[in-house]
Amino acid sequence: MPRMGTVNKEKYKTLKDVFDMFTEKNLFKLISQGYIDGLEGPLSMGKEANVFLARSSEELRVVKIYRLQTCDFNKMYDYIKADPRYTNLKRDRREVIFSWAQREFRNLLIAREKGMRVPTPYVAKDNILIMECVGGENVAQKLVKHKPQNIESFFKETIKQITLLYKANLIHADLSGFNILNDNEKPVLIDMSQATPLNNPNAEEYLKRDVHNICKLFDKWGLEIDEKKIIEQIKKQKV
C-alpha cells in the first residue's frame, strides 16, 4: 500500500487545523488504502463542506469533507427526510452527515451510469467523498467564474444534462452557476448531495427552481428563454 511521503506530510500539517480527529483518522485510512497520496491544498470552502485537491500518483483528485461540527445538519435532515431512499434516517448529527456524503456518492454513480457529465466518484467514507478532478491539471472553474464563449450552445447542453438526470428519476434540487463547471466549454454538474428522486413530494418545486436559476443566469448573459417551455421540454423526455 502506498504511504504518505514527507512532502505530503508537511503539506498536510499546514491544513491540519481544519480537521477534527475523526476526520484525520479517516483521511489517513483513505491514504493508506491508496485513494490519495495526500492533500495538495484547498479548492473551495463552502457552508457545509471543505473541498481540497489531492494527488493520487500523477493524477489530481478532489476530496470533499463535510464538516462534522459546524455544518447545518438540521437543514440537511430537512432535505433528506423527504427522499424516499432515506425514510428510516434518524435525526442524529453524524448519521445525517454520513448519509449526506453517501447520498452524493450514490447520486453521482447513477448520473455517470446515465451518461451524464459529472465527476466520477471513487469512494465515500463517513463524511469524506473522493472523486475525479474535472479538468485534471487545468482544474475546471465554476460557471459563474468562467462564462462560456458560446452561451446558447452551453445552455442547450446544460438543459440536456438536467434532462438526462430527470430521465434517471433524479432532480438536482440545488442547481445554479455555482455548481456547474465549465470544462472546455462543456457543463459538468457538481454538488449532487441534494439530488433527490422524482417521487420526493418536493420534486416539482425543485425542478422549477433549478430551471429558474439556470435561466436567470443565461438571461443575464443575453439569452432569451421561456422557462415554462424548458420545463415542459424536460418532462416530455421522460415519457
Image (cartoon, rainbow, N blue to C red):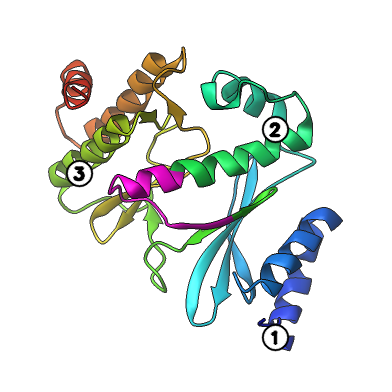
Q: x%, y% of residue 205?
A: 40, 15
Q: x%, y% of residue 62?
A: 53, 62
Give the residue type that dot 1 points to. Val
Q: x%, y% of residue 96?
A: 70, 33
Where's the N terminus, which quadrant? Answer: bottom right
Question: SS of the residue at dot 2?
Answer: helix
- Determine which residue is flagged by label 1: 7
Q: Is residue 111 magenta?
A: yes
Whether residue 129 is visible, yes or no, is no
Give the residue type that dot 3 points to. Glu
Q: Residue 162's image quarter?
A: top left
Residue at image location 20% in from the left, 46% down from the top: 154
Residue lying farthest top? Answer: 201
Q: Residue 35's image quarter?
A: bottom right
- Determine which residue is flagged by label 2: 96
The residue segment tinted magenta is 108-123
- Left or right of 63? Residue 166 is left
- Determine which residue is flagged by label 3: 157
The answer to whether 54 is drawn above or below residue 95 in the figure is below
Where's the C terminus, which quadrant? Answer: top left
Give the residue type that dot 2 points to. Val
Whether residue 18 is visible, yes or no, is yes
**Mark 2 vs mark 1: which is more N-terminal?**
1
Q: x%, y% of residue 176?
A: 39, 35
